[in-house]
């Protein structure tokens, strides 16, 4: 059972792991050891209490990690052994789910204060006067 939060647990039988050979340098060992781990989680069929708005946020935040069938696919080949890569995949999944559970704050439109507005206009007038004085000295 993968514990994401106190109220959200993902059963182990919903997580599918597969292993493959890692890419990149590594000498002779890389050609005979399958240390890369790929994790698949079928979000539409999950029995975990994963709210629909959070599912939508997860899909929009991580579009490259989703298949057309709605599966989340995460891979890891950071480490040289399978077990640490498996744990890394689980950590990535937990991080993604926790990030999607946080509801974004609604932006409240604000206006600049009268003092800020007058400061901005005063600065514009100073800049304009500076340019005008340069223009006058160039012409003569």
Image: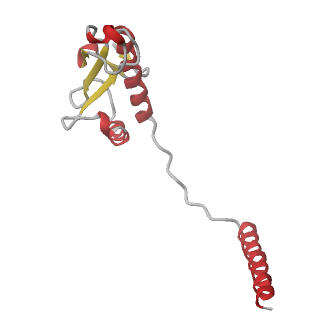
Q: Is residue 73 left or right of residue 105?
A: left
Residue 131 lies, in percent from the top left, at: 75, 79
Give the camera-side residue of 67 and 112.
Answer: 67
**Residue 95, quarter of picture:** top left
User: Could you tell me which quadrant the N terminus lies in?
Assistant: top left
Q: Residue at x 71, y 70 (%)?
A: 117
Residue 55 lies, in percent from the top left, at: 32, 36
Q: Residue at x 28, y 8 (%)?
A: 33
Q: Is residue 14 left or right of residue 106?
A: left
Q: Is residue 2 left or right of residue 136?
A: left
Q: How is the image coloured?
A: secondary structure
Give the camera-side residue of 7 and 39.
Answer: 39
Q: Residue furthest front?
A: 27
Q: Residue at x 43, y 20 (%)?
A: 6
Give above or below for 107 relative to 78.
Answer: below
Residue 138 lies, in percent from the top left, at: 77, 86
**Residue 22, quarter of picture:** top left
């Amino acid at each position: 059972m993968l514990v994401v939060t106190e109220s959200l647990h993902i059963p182990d039988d919903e997580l599918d792991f597969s292993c493959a050979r890692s890419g990149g340098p590594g000498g002779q060992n890389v050609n005979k050891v399958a240390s890369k781990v790929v994790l698949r989680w079928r979000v539409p069929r999950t029995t975990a209490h994963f709210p629909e708005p959070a599912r939508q946020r997860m899909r929009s935040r991580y579009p490259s990690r989703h298949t057309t069938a709605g599966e989340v696919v995460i891979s890891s080949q950071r480490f040289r052994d399978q077990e640490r890569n498996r744990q890394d995949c689980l950590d990535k999944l937990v991080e993604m789910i926790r990030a999607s559970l946080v509801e974004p704050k609604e932006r409240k439109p604000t206006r600049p204060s009268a003092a800020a507005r007058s400061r901005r206009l005063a600065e514009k007038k100073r800049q304009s006067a500076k340019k005008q004085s340069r223009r006058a000295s160039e012409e003569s």
